[in-house]
Amino acid sequence: MDVSLLLRQLHQHPIAYYPCYADMMGSVSGGVVLSQLMFHYGRRGNKFRRNDKQLLQETHVTIRELREAKRKLKTLTFLKITVEGLPAVTWYEVLPEELAEALSVPASLNDAVQTS
């Protein structure tokens, strides 16, 4: 049985989850939302749009978890969120230099890993 074919027939798309994003967001559900946004960044470029309905369908987080995640997303230095147009559309813009800085391993942790 071809599992990927079965998933496509069920219209299920797996999403990648990165634990470092959960650390940044302070929760697993927030990490799932950020992981999904970063997936879209990789596919669509620095600026892309995504509405709440799409994020809920893609991640299966609850509406409360999504609201909490969006509050935290607004505090991240590498992600700019704007609402534009009528009807309102949420745009996400990833700032690559700030993302690289946010993902960098602190020197003290890097030293500890190299000495063990």
Image: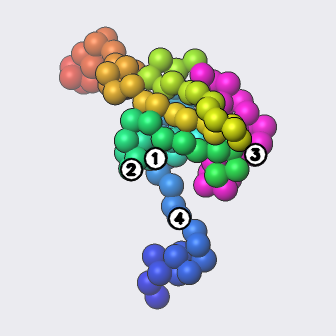
Q: In this orientation, does residue 86 appear?
A: yes
Mark 1 packing: few (<14 Cα in 10 Å), some, or many (20+)? some
Separation of marks 2 and 3 at Cα, in angstroms: 25 Å
**Which numbered dot is residue 40?**
1
Q: Quadrant of residue 58?
A: bottom right
Which marked residue is nearer to the observer: mark 3 or mark 1? 1
Pointers 2 and 3 in contact (CB under 8 A)? no
Q: Is residue 39 left or right of residue 53?
A: left
Q: Earlier in the sequence, mark 2 or mark 4?
A: 4
Magenta highlight range = 55-74
Q: Residues within 10 Å of mark 3 (few under 14, many from 20)?
A: few
Q: Is residue 40 above or below residue 13?
A: above
User: Label 4 to label 1, Cα distance in Å?
Assistant: 13 Å
Q: Secondary structure at mark 3?
A: loop
Give x and y (percent) for residue 66.
Answer: 70, 38
Type of the residue with mark 3? Thr
Label 4 or label 3, whichever comes before in sequence order: 4
| Residue tagged 4 | 13
The residue most toward the right is: 64
Residue 105 drawn at (x, y percent): 32, 21
Q: Amino acid at mark 4?
A: His
The answer to which quarter of the image holds residue 97 is top left
Secondary structure of the residue carrying tag 1 is helix
